[in-house]
Amino acid sequence: MQTVRKKPQRTCLGCRNSKDKQELIRIVRTPEGEVLIDRTGRKNGRGAYICPDPECLRLAVRSKALGRALETEIPAGLYEMLASEIEHGK
């Protein structure tokens, strides 16, 4: 009998719903303090997740959840990159 592996779950910073890790976009603060989008999901550092939905991004920006989750200031350009990523898909 084959064992079924659980898929890792993460919580979106916008809608606060738990979803499969692969469905979400990961944003990471590297040990050097750089904040960037982690397309591989494997970069070293503190990560936060958001749904690929413009409404979730809007909620996360309004509540400043991303800055709190990563414990740092978020550069304005990152929100624009995230919006572009969401608009054009992964």
Image: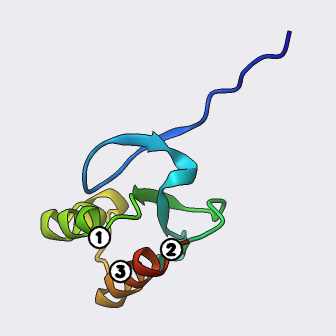
In the image, 90: left or right of 74? right
Tell which circle, 2 or 1, labels the residue nearer the N-terminal end. Answer: 1
Structural distance between the alpha carbons of marks 1 and 3:
7 Å
Q: Using the image as rendered, state which of residue 40 and residue 32 is in the foreground.
A: 40
Residue 50: percent from the left, percent from the top?
A: 38, 59
Residue at 70% in and 26% down = 5
Residue 3 in the image: state x and y as whole percent: 78, 17
Marks 1 & 3, CB-CB < 8 Å contact: yes
Furthest-front residue in this view: 88
Asked which secondary structure carries label 3, the reply is helix
Tell me the distance, in whole angstroms, between the alpha carbons under discs 3 and 2: 10 Å
Q: Give the quarter of the image for residue 84.
A: bottom left
The one nearer the camera, 22 or 64, is 22
SS at mark 2? loop
Q: Is residue 59 left or right of residue 79?
A: left
Packing grade of label 3 (10 A; few <14, some 14-19, many >=20) is some
Total labels: the figure holds 3
Crowding at label 2, few (<14), some or many (≥20) Cα neighbours within 10 Å? few
Q: Which residue is mark 2?
A: 89
Question: Which residue reaches farthest top?
Answer: 1
Above-or-below relation of 9 to 84:
above
Placement of 71 over or under 3, stated as above or below: below
Type of the residue with mark 2: Gly
First in sequence: mark 3 vs mark 2: 3
Residue that numbered label 3 is attached to: 83
Q: Residue at x 62, y 60 (%)?
A: 41
Vertical relation: 90 (above or below) 77: above
Q: Residues within 10 Å of mark 1 (few under 14, many from 20)?
A: some
